[in-house]
Image (cartoon, rainbow, N blue to C red):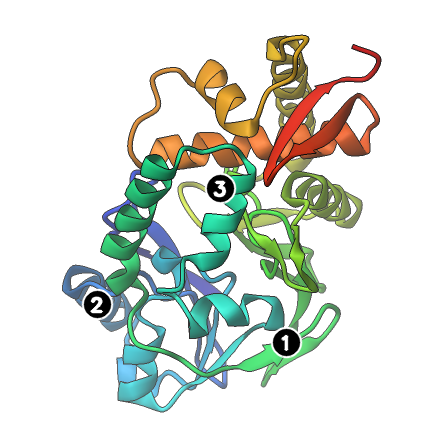
Amino acid sequence: MQIHKIIVPTPFYVGPVNVYLVRNDPLTLIDVGPNTEEAYIALQDGLSKLGVRLEEIKRIIVSHAHEDHYGLAWRVQEVSGAEILMHSWEEKKVLNNQDYSEHKKLLNRAGVPKEIIERFEQGYLRFSPLAGNKIYFNAVKDGEDIVFENGSLKVLHTPGHTPGSICLLRESNRELIAADTVIKHISPNPMLHVDPLDSHRRFPSLSEYLCSVARIKEIAPTFIHSGHGNPILDYGEHFHRLVMRTQERQMKVISLLPKRGATAWEISGLLFPNAEGVHRYLAVSEAQAHLDMSVVDERLIMEKQDETEYFRLKGS
């Protein structure tokens, strides 16, 4: 089983996305890139250099439902008839990628002003064409083996960056395809999401993410193929740095809380005062995730005023 990286351009600040071809029967792509003509041509060219035509692809595995990873899935499937596999917790995103109603509720609870929520929504809708046409997929679950002629890849459900994020493990040599769960040069953003099992609950993205990366540490991968940038060869050291950065960020968030308490929106402005555009949204996601985890750790308490959530230190 050979795993080849194909670098595909994206319009996002994170830069190009890594698509992987598993050169074994059935020929399989892991992620595909965003729904742009530039990405489609790059994918075709990358496959061509490996002696593979797009029409020969028989299976697409989507690591998570972000536009830069799955946007071309519909087009590849249309050309090749490939089966699409993804975790079931990503279903709502791919079937209703223009529905912003649940995000509006989460942002309202975070204390984001109405006019800013409207601005976020307009930005989201501008990006929605990058998701491509609606796709239908077969769900995979944690521990499932995706079988090839010469080996298999085990599905690891690694929630955090998104609820349904997955990694793929080649158990014979502990080689891991981690997509955005592990990125060498940045820490993946713990995105705002509704809990896939309870639409009235916010998904605990940061807590789940830390559990996922700890699980990967127990596997002791020898080589990690990432969704962006270079591979990771020293995951133990990478994990240590990631945990240290997370702890430092959480202490920073707690130190910024005034005695009267604050919303995630207010803390995001103190934490990232120069953030603009999509980075403003990511700042809210980051602040909310750390506040939620601090509540779970019993460092903070959360109180509701109308529909808005305020966080403050215990005993203050």
Percent coordinates x, y for residue 226 in the rendering: 49, 48
How packed mark 2 is, by other alpha carbons closer than 10 Å (few <14, some 14-19, many 20 or more), is many
**Residue that carries the numbered disc 3 in the rendered image:** 107
Viewer-nearest residue: 199 or 16: 199
Q: Residue at x 41, y 45 (%)?
A: 228
Percent coordinates x, y for residue 90 in the rendering: 54, 66
Viewer-nearest residue: 37 or 127: 127
Q: Residue at x 36, y 74 (%)?
A: 73
Q: Sequence order check: which comes first, mark 3 or mark 1? A: 3
Q: Residue at x 30, y 70 (%)?
A: 72
Q: Is residue 225 visible?
A: yes
Rounded to the nearest angstrom, the CA distance separating label 3 from label 2 is 34 Å
**Residue that carries the numbered disc 2 in the rendered image:** 40
Q: Residue at x 38, y 54 (%)?
A: 18
The quadrant in which the N terminus is found is bottom right
How packed mark 3 is, by other alpha carbons closer than 10 Å (few <14, some 14-19, many 20 or more), is many
Secondary element at tag 2: helix
Rounded to the nearest angstrom, the CA distance separating label 1 from label 2 is 26 Å
**Position of residue 183 in the picture relative to residue 195 (left or right):** left
| Residue 265 versus residue 13 in the image, above or below | above
Q: Quadrant of residue 156?
A: bottom right
Amino acid type assigned to the residue bearing label 2 in the image: Tyr
Secondary element at tag 1: strand
Q: Nearer the viewer, mark 3 or mark 2?
A: 3
Q: Is residue 5 visible?
A: no
Amino acid type assigned to the residue bearing label 3 in the image: Leu
Secondary element at tag 3: helix
Tell me the number on the disc at residue 140: 1
Q: Quadrant of residue 165?
A: bottom right
Amino acid type assigned to the residue bearing label 1 in the image: Val
